[in-house]
Image: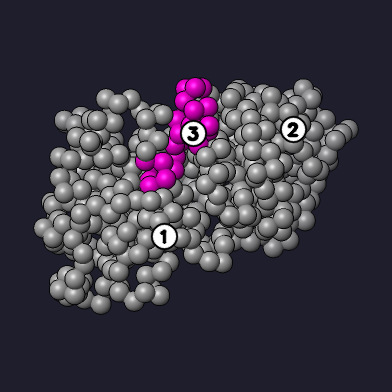
């Protein structure tokens, strides 16, 4: 048994002092999350069109006249230098690569209007790009599509300190928004490992889930309004900040999760919760996944309204962050780890509830070891173990990533069956994710991309997920890599309706082609 501890001022709330004492893990210097797009292998991947044998659609080629026209619209913000374009043509995992010759950086909605109107008239394909932190190849060109970056659209338009409604441009970085709000006593309802790089517009376009979904719900419920430029250059302005607006269709929902295929989100309004005054994190070790599930049930029952996150990771996940990032595991080796976060407005109340929960978890025999973080350094150190798994995996080799949702009791069974299926074909098979919303991140690493390994994984993973009534994309979207697998999670009729919506709004198909929605026959 390892020991827990929770500093509570002048008194201890532990009723089991005989076996528990304060522990002080030596975190050392906690590394910052890596914001670079290029963390993975040293060389670029092959061109996507060659690796995946994709045929280019009949879009126009970019000419020098086109470049001059864009220069007139956004002087000095048209990028054509190959070395400057390189990081925008490759995803940060280095699994897909396009060869765009033009990158555009508008600052305003009206500049986006002029760009898309011209591209539509010329039948020039466009790839919208935010922070380029996506994991399914949705934010980089497949061929030579023009990249429209929202990087300079990073202005906070207004913030209502009474209602908590934030209105901002789509290019604002998630972490910067959170810092802006914290100064005013609020936080973003969304938290991601890529928060230092990802853009809020891209978060909406992919309907990102993240680490706070258990507490604050999905983006579809917190986004109050948005503004988007359609492929023909017209503006859909639904940028209100009302909690209740029951007038006609809720058009903003079309663009949340559309992955840039219907237009470019340029601004949004989002409801932000108050910043918690007290945050505690417990990191627990378990021997069996059945114990992980029991801990989750106990969390919901005993922590209730202060429970803000409940994450799990397996021993392979821990090995990755220790081996590649030199992070410190504060616990003895375990088969599974559970991260529990509480956040509330009254510290003593939260600490008392957390203590009772931990006492019951130990008494029930579900936990073999654990530690608690109440100060910012320890909290960051514990969260780094979970948030930086993706980064560690990228350093282990080529990564086959699967972002799946399914009944929570089935989460780890797929990981175990995948290990048996692949055997020595894979370097590692890793499972971690969000217990609160039944989201598994299944990752397989190999020395390099292999068609034979991919054929073992697909359709196996998708068949297994569909058989257990799950979704093949919980929060990452479909992008380029999963587009043609949509039928595992959506009916033919549903996909056909999506195709009709796409054709109505983008009849020339210029917006992020080859992504998300299969073409109509």
Q: Residue at point 53% right, 66% down? A: 43
Q: Is residue 329 left or right of residue 264?
A: right
Query: Which percent across, then down, holds residue 518?
Result: 30, 39
Find residue 500 and report its image quarter.
top left
Task: Name the N-terminal-most of marks 2 and 3.
Answer: 2
Task: Name the N-terminal-most of marks 3 and 1.
Answer: 1
Are the two marked residues, 3 and 1, in contact with CB atoms closer than 8 angstroms?
no
Residue identified by numbered label 2: 286
Q: Is residue 192 magenta?
A: no
Are the two marked residues, 2 and 3, in contact with CB atoms closer than 8 angstroms?
no
Q: How is the image coloured?
A: one colour
Secondary structure beneath disc 1? loop
- In the rendered image, the vertical position of residue 63 relative to residue 145, given as above or below: below
Region in magenta: 458-483
- Residues at marks 2 and 1, CA–CA distance in whole angstroms: 43 Å
Q: Residue at point 18% right, 61% down? A: 60
Query: Which percent across, then down, holds residue 270?
Result: 34, 45
- Residues at marks 3 and 1, CA–CA distance in whole angstroms: 23 Å
Residue identified by numbered label 1: 47
- Residues at marks 2 and 3, CA–CA distance in whole angstroms: 31 Å
Tell me if I can see residue 306 in this picture.
no
Q: Please tell me whether mark 2 or mark 1 is closer to you in this view.
A: 1
Q: Residue at point 41% right, 60% down? A: 47
Residue identified by numbered label 3: 459
């Amino acid at each position: 048994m390892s020991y827990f501890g929770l500093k509570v001022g002048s008194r201890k709330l532990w009723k089991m002092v005989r076996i528990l004492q304060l522990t002080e893990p030596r975190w050392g210097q906690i590394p910052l999350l890596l914001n670079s797009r290029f963390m993975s292998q040293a060389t670029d991947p092959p061109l996507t069109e060659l690796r995946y044998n994709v045929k280019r659609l009949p879009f126009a080629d970019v000419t020098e006249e086109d470049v001059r026209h864009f220069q007139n619209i956004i002087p000095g913000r048209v990028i054509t230098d190959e070395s400057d374009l390189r990081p925008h043509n490759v995803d940060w995992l280095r699994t897909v690569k396009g060869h765009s010759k033009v990158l555009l950086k508008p600052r305003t909605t009206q500049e986006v209007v002029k760009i898309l109107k011209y591209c539509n008239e010329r039948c020039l394909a466009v790839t919208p790009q935010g922070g380029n932190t996506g994991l399914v190849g949705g934010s980089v060109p497949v061929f030579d599509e023009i990249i429209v970056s929202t990087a300079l659209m990073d202005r906070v338009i207004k913030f209502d300190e009474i209602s908590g409604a934030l209105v901002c441009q789509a290019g604002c970085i998630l972490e910067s928004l959170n810092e802006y709000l914290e100064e005013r006593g609020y936080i973003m309802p969304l938290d991601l490992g890529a928060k230092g790089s990802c853009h809020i517009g891209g978060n909406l376009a992919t309907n990102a889930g993240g680490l706070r979904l258990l507490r604050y719900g999905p983006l579809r419920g917190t986004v109050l309004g948005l503004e988007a430029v359609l492929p023909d250059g017209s503006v859909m302005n639904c940028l209100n900040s009302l909690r209740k607006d029951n007038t006609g269709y809720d058009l903003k929902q079309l663009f949340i999760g559309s992955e840039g295929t219907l237009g470019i989100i340029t601004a949004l309004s989002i409801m932000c919760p108050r910043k918690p005054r007290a945050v505690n994190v417990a990191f627990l070790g378990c021997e069996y996944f059945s114990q992980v599930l029991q801990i989750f049930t106990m969390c919901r029952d005993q922590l209730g309204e202060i429970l803000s996150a409940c994450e799990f990771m397996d021993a392979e996940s821990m090995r990755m962050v220790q081996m590649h990032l030199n992070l410190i595991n504060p616990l003895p080796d375990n088969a599974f780890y559970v991260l529990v976060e509480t956040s509330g407005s009254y510290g003593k109340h939260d600490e008392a509830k957390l203590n009772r929960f931990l006492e019951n978890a130990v008494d029930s025999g579900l936990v073999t070891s654990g530690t608690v973080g109440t100060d910012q350094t320890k909290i960051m150190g514990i969260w780094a173990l979970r948030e930086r798994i993706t980064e560690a995996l990228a350093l282990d080799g080529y990564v086959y990533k699967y972002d799946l949702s399914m009944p929570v009791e089935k989460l780890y069974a797929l990981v175990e069956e995948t290990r048996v299926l692949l055997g020595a074909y894979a370097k590692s098979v890793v499972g971690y994710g969000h217990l609160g919303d039944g989201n598994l991140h299944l990752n397989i690493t190999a020395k390099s991309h292999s068609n034979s390994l991919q054929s073992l994984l697909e359709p196996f993973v998708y068949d297994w997920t569909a058989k257990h009534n799950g979704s093949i994309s919980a929060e990452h979207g479909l992008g380029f890599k999963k587009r043609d697998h949509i039928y595992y999670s959506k009916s033919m009729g549903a996909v056909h309706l999506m195709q009709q919506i796409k054709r109505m709004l983008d009849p020339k198909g210029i917006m992020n082609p080859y992504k998300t929605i299969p073409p109509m026959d």
